[in-house]
Image: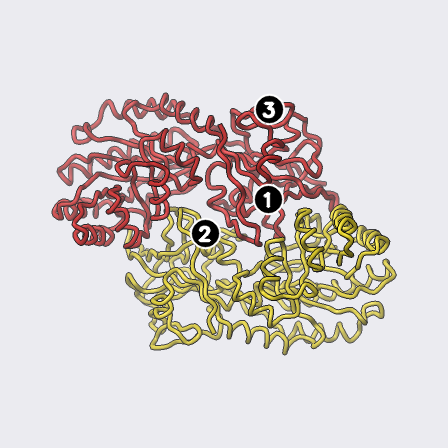
Chain colours: A yellow, B red
Amino acid sequence: MSKVKPIGPIPAGYETIDGELSIGGETASALVAEHGSPLFIYSARHLDSRIEALRAAMPDQLHIHYAMKANPYAPLLSHMVGLVDGIDIASGGELAMALGAGASANHISFAGPGKRDDELLRAIQAGVTINIESPTECDRALAIGANEGLQPRLAIRVNPDFDLKGSGMKMGGGAKQFGMDVELVAPTVQTILEAGAHWRGFHIFAGSQALKADAIIETQAQTIALAARLAEEIGQSPEHVNLGGGFGIAYFPGDEALDIAQIGHALDQQFAKLPAILRETQFAVELGRYLVGEAGVYLTQIVDRKESRGESFLVVDGGLHHQLAASGNFGTVIRRNYPAAIATQYDKPSEEIISIVGCLCTPLDLLSDRAEMPKAQVGDIVAIFCAGAYGASASPANFLGQGPAKELLVG
Amino acid sequence: MSKVKPIGPIPAGYETIDGELSIGGETASALVAEHGSPLFIYSARHLDSRIEALRAAMPDQLHIHYAMKANPYAPLLSHMVGLVDGIDIASGGELAMALGAGASANHISFAGPGKRDDELLRAIQAGVTINIESPTECDRALAIGANEGLQPRLAIRVNPDFDLKGSGMKMGGGAKQFGMDVELVAPTVQTILEAGAHWRGFHIFAGSQALKADAIIETQAQTIALAARLAEEIGQSPEHVNLGGGFGIAYFPGDEALDIAQIGHALDQQFAKLPAILRETQFAVELGRYLVGEAGVYLTQIVDRKESRGESFLVVDGGLHHQLAASGNFGTVIRRNYPAAIATQYDKPSEEIISIVGCLCTPLDLLSDRAEMPKAQVGDIVAIFCAGAYGASASPANFLGQGPAKELLVG
């Protein structure tokens, strides 16, 4: 017999119409009838309420940036540009998309360990802030600026000497390809200042996808202390400090939503006792997954239902080519089930243990492993939640000749 | 201090010119100078010699099919069409590509657990063999055929009651979404015959990426015995039996190349003592990775070299968006190093322990972890081997706004 495996928690805020999952006021079956399957649906209302709740919890003076790598779908990105204080990019391709979505160059910053010269050139021409990751990258940016007769806007990305505890992805606290070790920061800022370029401040990103407020609070305090120590060493206040992100979302069984009120309260206290050298500094957090992850649902229609050796399978017309992370093949060691449901039987009780597999001819294409679900048939629609971040753009869309899923932003 | 980690074995057949890795008679630096970086290079000579060696080892009457999911790059696919006896596809998209590459519909077969009606329709119209994965899929195919006034060519994909031992991906031996359980096969063939459709035979695929000849030999013997048992139950000889694949290539430290001579010898013996009901049957093996994997090299140029907390990093302009599997994020639980080299310092001795990371702003983007390499600088070119299968098409090309790498088939 199959052993049941739990699914992750379905994000709050989803409703039903006539017993079906609805998004933006339309049922899953109406959305698929109109737009086809597979389909990524992003809810603008979810995006709005997430930002609103975050602003209410955080200190007024904190800027909120969107790390567009989480989801670069153009209509969603344009929507986010209207909601946040800055867009963080990670490539020349994302620079073009951010400008295309209406972001102002003043509010764009560019991080990434392998920026090519042509990307630095376009970033300097556009006037965006470049988070410098190494002394040699600094030299390249200054040379390009001098060659163009332009003053680059350069922040230093620091490899912090601490990490974000409980983080799904550590990006600090040891040997890293990201940013520069602490002792290289002051000399590199001196080089920037001597070259007459515009030193913007620091970018300090210790890790991502943490669900414990305590860990984020501790990291933010360490980040502010590190920024103060570096500013003292440089002898100049930074205009801007990017405190990184780290705000996680609940994907898996047992995950609990992050307590942002606690983080906001602690950050208020931090801001109230800032060292003198940081009192005029503009602070920001850089969030991707936290802002958009729960606003997206991946809908995919059931093509076959089959039994094999006592187990049941639903075969859908989508798969890991659109939702690689949900298949357990992206950044996870042990596969666990994302939140999932039969969208067209949404209010029905669970009746059976069933696996939901994608249409690809590979055993990797497993979207939900032996979870309890209402009884579904061919034509029913499966919903995979938490599909708003690292979904469509982080999956191999052309694998097995399938091509991308349609994406749609709804109200 | 860094602890050195080994790299996988570099495939045979690569040469040097002026101390550099060369492919198709051109150095890595000449190829990158002409075509840019990052760049997938596929060697036609490697493809030719791999097929030639395989044909020499296998029984004359065995057909060799190419499973194009491994690499659908159009010029490579066209080249393969000229070398093999059949093309195995896994989607409507691959059907169009196979026909476009000049494959004859008679030599195409289509497997995949989630075939949509529109894909079945196109396959039936084209006249390719469809490997039927469930009784309900059979009903759909027969209905579409009847509706079109066409006689579908249908084989049965069997979920074998054994697996391929030591296989990287098991596709048989238990509850599976692939094919149908053994006891469903004969009734489904009866349905096909009664409907007046063309029953082509069996497709029995137990697993892939095995490196032990013994395991493949045992599986092939079991597969032939199963085909005979099913044919007796049906009371009719199958025209065609696809014995599956399973031939692996050496990716990782300690992997040893598969002994195909041993497999060919055993298969000769099997064919010499075939049961009467299979004596007129055409047998085929379906290989993807084994045919094309070692013929591909991914070239990517070094953008930065940095030291952090006692470790050294080379940052390249490519990454997991082109080579997801090499980053350890596709179908592997424990990350190990693919074969890699500094292409532009190819004949130099190892001098240091260094990690090669991609340009993406994520710690997942690790192409080679703390391996011994000659000393490389910015502008040098890194080669990741075994890039001919499940590389470009199995990676999230648009992640972080990067876009696909150029691909090139050379002589």
Circle 1: element type: loop
Image point (54%, 68%), residue name:
A256
Q: Which residue is mark 1?
A: B318
Can you see residue A7?
no
Amino acid type for the residue under numbered disc 2: Ala
Disc 3 chain ID: B
Q: Is residue B254 above or below residue A102?
A: above
Q: CA distance from mark 3 to mark 2?
A: 35 Å
Q: Are marks 3 and 2 on the same chain?
A: no
Image point (67%, 53%), residue name:
A122
Asked if the residue at tag 3 contacts the one at tag 1, i.e. Cβ–Cβ closer than 8 Å, the answer is no
Q: Are marks 1 and 2 on the same chain?
A: no
**Position in image of residue B63 (x %, y %):** 30, 29
**Position in image of residue A68 (x %, y %):** 59, 61
Q: Which mark is residue B16?
A: 3
User: In the picture provided, is A223 more to the left or to the right than B316?
Assistant: right
**Position in image of residue A335 (x %, y %):** 47, 54
- Crowd rating for badge 2 (residues with CA inside 10 Å; few <14, some 14–19, many 20+): many
Q: Which residue is mark 2?
A: A397
Residue in front for this viewpoint, B381 or A54: B381
User: In the picture provided, is A109 more to the left or to the right than B318?
Assistant: right
Q: Quadrant of residue A217?
A: bottom right
Looking at the figure, which quarter contains the N terminus of chain B?
top right
The number of numbered badges drawn on the structure is 3
Image point (64%, 41%), residue name:
B356
